[in-house]
Amino acid sequence: MKRLMIGSLLGVSMLVGTPAILPILAQRSYAQTSQTQAAQLQQLMQQAWQQTQQGQPLQAIETLKQALAIAQSIQNREGEALANLVLGFNYNRIGKSQEALTYFQQALPIMREVRDRTGEAATLHNIGAVYRDIGQPQQALTYFQQALPIRREVGDRAGEATTLSNIGAVYRAIGKPQEAIENLEKSVQITLEMRAGLQQENRQTFLESNRGTLVSLVDLLIDQNQPDQAFKWYNLATTFDLADYTRLIDAQVGDPEAQKLIDQWNQNHQRLQFLYAQVDQDWTPQLSQQINQLQAQNSQLAENISRQYPPVAELFETTPQDIQTIRENIAPGTLVIQPVLLTNIRNVQDKIGIFLVSRDQATLVRTIPINPTEFDAILTEYRAQIQNPNSDNYAGNQELLYDYLIRPVEADIAAYSPEKIAIIATGKLRYIPWETFYDNQSDQYLLEKYPIHYLTRISATRHIPSNPTRTPNILAFGNPTPTSQELPGSEQEARQVTEILSGEYWVREEATLNRFYNDYLRFNILHLANPVCLNPQGCAELEANQILFANGEILNIADIALLGLNQTKLVVLSACQTAMTRESDGRELPAIAYLFERAGADAVIASLWSAEDKKALLIMTQFYENVNEGMTKAEALRQAKLTFVQQGLHPFSWSPLILIGDGSYL
């Protein structure tokens, strides 16, 4: 007998305010149904769900009505329940709330009749969503709170997170902020736990589709004057994507014992994914118990790995780090700035929140209204302008970005009197050198006011002693050959930096990977003026996440942690190749720095785009001379760039090289 298969009807979105259809129907047999009728019903339901996913609600409704008629005529109760549920969802999508309620209410008793607990929970949830949308919050709460225990019973973690998120949104709407915060935190917690266990190819989509609950939580905490809590949650959930990146490129960990445990965790996780798939097909209390037990075992294993091997803890971390711990690890005299886009929240104006965090003072956050589409367009356009040496129309966007991100906190920054500013950027802001933001009132770049460096999750939470290295020494590579493009500036760069600081250099055909492996442990500064591909689409001679050495030899960045860089104070990657597209999220550069940091390095200098060969040479040699004179890394790079700023040169020439990580002394 043919079986009706819709696959996994996973939530259309877990954003607050969007109803979700959860796994309802997978492979089920239908007795007393002709093969032809079953096949027709299956085809129509598959077509309807495809139309639903593609945002074609009107077409889906017509298809579903045909399916519903067939299901009723052949007394296929499960098909009838599913058709009613998806009809309700699509009617709600086009704003016909009463029609949606009618179909949901028709689906509910049938779901109970056929004992489809997952479908019952989804129907209850969607009824609650309709009542929320039409301004009946108490009714909405009643249905959400009925759905929640069923979703827990069947082990539907995604559905549980969605329902908790919606409960939080309703509590906020009726003026109960504490109850709202409690439910939103529980929702985000589940989302983080699920994200940590997703397969590589699904993680980024999951992150994007579940951002709404986090943003709602952060916005509410700001509104309730709890900036510390807001900063904790946002810092965890948005910089965690650098850990995601290590999974996406199969990055290894340095300790083989830790790798064995991670492999065991992955095996358990794959087993969990198989069991979750069975829930769609044949849920039983025993299956739910089996899933819960294995999930608990794997959670305990993750906790053990995190405790025994702190450098890889972020692969499993799902709770925010205490704000006091974060503060204690901020270097004295450093002010951390983190912008947060607070957009797409139901009934709340889009805005930017700008956090200011320092070692000794309370966290401060300012918010300003924003049009997210216009802001994204500014970032995209400005990046294109400053990476093009022939552009001459970038000044307006420099001023706009200063007005958006610095002007609202300008007086607060001045009150801190920071020695240097550290930026935690996310999304497309990672592609933009903040040094180039321009204050048209004082006629100054931000770089002229403060030394600037950037932080990843590791460098934001790891304490590094600020004492200078007694004997800085450098291993430099440049212009590895043969390649399709000669880089004479990088060759000269490798020679000159070893004249400033004691060390060794290898260029052209001698810049081999084997030489690097033989020598890198003897030096605390690694200077690689080699081509580095950070472009996700790959580069001319390299695939993404590769460093080129002589004779076409490749160092995969995924293997960086295997090197062991605990004595490395600085890694310089002065010839990076990357690019921003409309879909880019800016992870590449900070993620590479993050991997070097996780391997033990204190800081990384890298280029946001392919820097001009001769200008990179001059900036890097001046940087090392400044360090040799006793400047911090952040101040040394600032002064090296200011030489070009004072000459009025295009930002293309001086702004791509940025410092990520510890900004204090070498």
Image (tube, rainbow, N blue to C red):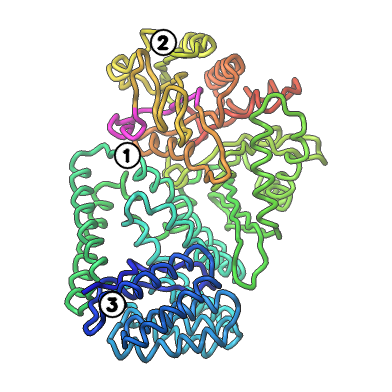
Tag on residue 251? 1
Looking at the image, tell me whether mark 3 or mark 1 is earlier in sequence order: 3
Give the residue drawn at x 58%, y 39%.
431
Q: Circle 3 sits in a helix, a strand or a loop, which is it?
A: loop
Q: Are marks 3 and 1 in contact (CB under 8 Å)?
A: no
> Residue 380 colored magenta?
no
Tag on residue 481? 2
As displayed, is residue 112 above or below residue 7?
A: below
Q: Circle 1 sits in a helix, a strand or a loop, which is it?
A: loop
Q: Amino acid at mark 3?
A: Val
Tag on residue 154? 3
Q: Nearer the viewer, residue 126 or 441?
A: 126
Within 10 angstroms of label 1, few (less than 14), some, or many (20 or more) residues?
some
Q: Position of residue 52 (x, y in %)?
A: 48, 68
Q: Amino acid at mark 2?
A: Thr
Residue numbers of the magenta segment = 556-576
Q: How far is disc 3 from disc 1 in space, using C-alphas?
A: 34 Å
Q: Nearer the viewer, mark 2 or mark 1?
A: 2
